[in-house]
Image: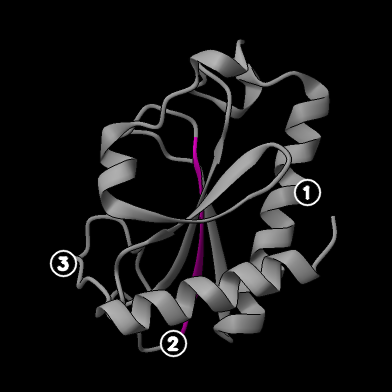
């Protein structure tokens, strides 16, 4: 699995904005203001399933998911943190970390496929991304 051959899936690139790079994953913010929602994408080519990663990188992935969850809860307090690695529409391995609040647009169902995304206003996007970047930098694995 060559790091040089890694390329972000075009749909992930279109739906998200970069936040920060962690040792294994790029952390990206879903551009949907209805939910505080991060996507972690391991920078490895050809991955579809978590099991496609070597054991040590599987552990690193979950450590980074936990780090992202802590940062997300610090920036966007929530009632529940949803994690998912579905890959039905976008095959490239990526993990969703979504802060859920009772009464949000899709509550209690899943956020995937519910309604249309409501992109952040530029100032809101910048503020959310900057807050997440700071929170992620402050939280160690």
- Nearer-the-camera pick, 47 or 131: 131
Q: For the residues carrying marks 2 and 3, which lies nearer the camera in this image? A: 3
Q: CA distance from mark 1 to mark 2?
A: 26 Å
Residue at image mark 3: 115
Residue at image coords 24%, 80%: 121
Residue 102 numbered mark, or none: 2
Q: CA distance from mark 2 to mark 3?
A: 17 Å
Q: In this picture, is 73 found above or below 109? A: below
- The disc, 3 or 1, on the residue closer to the chain's N-terminal end is 1
Q: In this picture, is 131 found above or below 29? A: below
Magenta portion: prevailing SS class: strand
Quick one: label 3, few (<14), some, or many (20+) residues within 10 Å?
few
- Which quadrant of the view contains residue 10? top left
Image quadrant containing the N terminus: top right
Across and down, in percent, residue 9 comes to: 34, 31
- Which quadrant of the view contains residue 110? bottom left
Q: For the residues carrying marks 3 and 1, which lies nearer the camera in this image? A: 1
Quick one: SS at disc 2? loop
Residue at image mark 1: 63
Q: Please provide the residue range marked out in magenta.
A: 94-101
Q: In this picture, is 138 found above or below 77? A: above
Q: Locate residue 93 relative to residue 14 in the image: left or right.
A: right
Quick one: SS at disc 1? helix
């Amino acid at each position: 699995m060559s790091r040089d051959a890694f390329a972000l899936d075009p749909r992930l690139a279109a739906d998200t904005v970069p936040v920060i790079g962690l040792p294994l994953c790029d952390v990206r913010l879903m551009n949907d203001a209805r939910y505080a929602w991060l996507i972690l994408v391991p920078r490895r080519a050809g991955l579809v399933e978590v099991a496609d990663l070597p054991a040590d990188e599987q552990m690193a992935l979950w450590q980074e998911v936990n780090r992202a969850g802590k940062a997300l809860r610090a920036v966007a307090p929530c009632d529940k943190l949803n994690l998912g690695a579905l890959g039905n529409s976008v095959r490239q391995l990526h993990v969703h970390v979504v802060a859920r609040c009772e009464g949000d647009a899709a509550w209690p169902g899943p956020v995937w496929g519910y309604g249309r995304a409501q992109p952040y206003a530029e100032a809101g996007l910048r503020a959310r991304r900057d807050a997440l970047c700071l929170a992620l930098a402050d939280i160690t694995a």
